[in-house]
């Protein structure tokens, strides 16, 4: 059997498909999502596949049917069309300087303007954004698809500096405000992030956006389920078991204990593996704290230092549904942001009180988080 190559850290769908990387088929989710409405938001922890999902949506709306050969979506989509796609990626930048966000957005707008042009009198970032959307539709004859990856990263990067955070918030409000203004020119809008910030115009002004973060139908749109593990990685688990002198069942159980256990809806019927850690474990045939050791978000470390939560009460802690995917009150209650960062997950739901119970998802996360907390205490 030819050696399999795992897409560790690779977030571009075309790269994965063109170069023979192992791919867990999420294309049916793409079809369902794109046929459910127009405006959507998804919150998931870092390194959980959000960027790959964005890239998959981009390929789909560009009409790249060739990239989806053999995947579930080809049995669902019969009318492949190409739309102009604007992909805004706010990852990979440091927003700790006063003009860093404006500079980032300006570079993105310049790239789009090179393709679609710039109108007279378009000076402000928001006006340029609106103009690009309008011209893209006019020039192509098709409405525009807008995909935004880590829409709130400039805010999370500056939680420790209220003045700069407020400046970034105002910049993003002015920029994202163009989404509502451009409604008639838009086909589909999808934003991802770690958290939901109600005070940003994308949520306060665009009140028809659908948050799928806790929806049962899309609970496994990112991450790897047990069925997907068995279907896609059966031979890899066996190879890892052979390397360790274990049975398949024993190796499977160890992987489950280390990397499974994430729940993203109240029903608790579907848990998912952390894809980053699982792929690394199968690729290197060893168990390690891959996800945790890939870096802890600075905003989480700062939050833990400021709030000093009772570590003994995190397991079994409860939080109301409205707060779970928002950071608007994070200084009063750090639990939501610990959950959003991937260090806690849903372990129960009280429907009467709309209240979630939280717990560590697995061994990797629990041991890593306790070590982190002890080191900063």
Image (cartoon, rainbow, N blue to C red):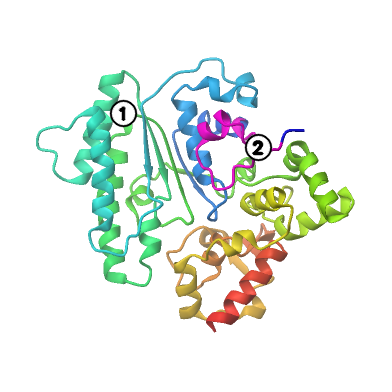
Q: How far is mark 2 from mark 1, CA to CA?
A: 33 Å
Asked whether the viewer can see residue 266, the reply is no
Asked if the stretch drawn in magenta spans residue 15, the answer is yes
Who is closer to the viewer here, 218 or 168? 168
Asked if the stretch drawn in magenta spans residue 40, the answer is no
**What residue do we see at 69% from left, 48% from top?**
283
Give coordinates of residue 67: x percent, y percent. Answer: 55, 25
Left or right for 363, reference 53:
right
Left or right for 105, reference 376:
left
**What residue do we see at 50% from left, 38% from top?**
12
Tag 1 residue? 185
> Disc 2 vs disc 1: which is toward the camera?
2
Tag 2 residue? 24
> Which quadrant is the N terminus positioned in?
top right
Give coordinates of residue 290: x percent, y percent. Answer: 63, 59
Give coordinates of residue 108: x percent, y percent. Answer: 29, 42
Helix, strand or loop at mark 1: helix
Residue 157 sits in which quadrant? Answer: bottom left
Residue 133 sits in which quadrant? Answer: top left
Work out which residue is located at the far top of the displayed protein and give it.
Answer: 79
Highlighted range, magenta:
3-27
């Amino acid at each position: 059997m030819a050696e399999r190559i795992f897409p560790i850290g690779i977030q571009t769908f075309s790269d994965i498909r063109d170069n023979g990387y192992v791919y867990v088929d999420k294309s049916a989710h793409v079809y369902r999502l794109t046929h459910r409405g127009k405006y959507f938001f998804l919150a998931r922890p870092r390194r959980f596949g959000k960027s790959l999902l964005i890239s998959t949506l981009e390929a789909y709306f560009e009409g790249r049917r060739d990239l989806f050969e053999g995947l579930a979506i080809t049995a669902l989509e019969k009318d492949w069309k190409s739309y102009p796609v604007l992909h805004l990626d706010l990852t990979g930048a440091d927003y700790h300087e006063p003009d860093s966000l404006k500079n980032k957005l300006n570079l993105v707008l310049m790239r789009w303007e090179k393709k679609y042009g710039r109108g007279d009198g378009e000076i402000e970032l928001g006006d340029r954004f609106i103009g690009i959307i309008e011209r893209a539709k006019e020039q192509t004859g098709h409405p525009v698809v807008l995909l935004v990856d880590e829409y709130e990263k400039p805010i999370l990067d500056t939680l420790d500096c209220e003045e700069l955070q407020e400046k970034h918030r105002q910049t993003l409000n002015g920029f994202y405000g163009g989404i509502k203004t451009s409604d008639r020119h838009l086909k589909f809008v999808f934003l991802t992030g770690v958290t939901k910030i109600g005070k940003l115009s994308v949520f306060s002004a665009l009140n028809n956006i659908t948050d799928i973060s806790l929806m049962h139908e899309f609970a496994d749109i990112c991450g790897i389920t047990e069925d997907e593990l068995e279907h896609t990685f059966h031979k890899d688990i066996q190879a890892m078991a052979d390397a360790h002198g274990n049975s398949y069942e024993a190796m499977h159980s160890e992987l489950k204990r280390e990397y499974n256990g994430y729940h993203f809806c109240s029903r608790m019927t579907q848990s998912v593996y952390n894809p980053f850690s699982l792929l690394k474990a199968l690729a290197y045939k060893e168990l390690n704290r891959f996800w945790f050791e890939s870096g802890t978000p600075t905003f989480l470390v700062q939050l833990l230092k400021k709030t000093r939560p009772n570590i003994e009460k995190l397991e079994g802690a409860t939080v109301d549904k409205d707060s779970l995917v928002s950071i608007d009150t994070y200084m009063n209650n750090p639990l939501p942001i610990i959950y959003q960062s991937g260090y806690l997950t849903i372990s129960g739901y009280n429907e009467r009180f709309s209240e979630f119970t939280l717990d560590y998802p697995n061994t990797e996360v629990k041991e890593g988080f306790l070590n982190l907390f002890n080191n900063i205490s």
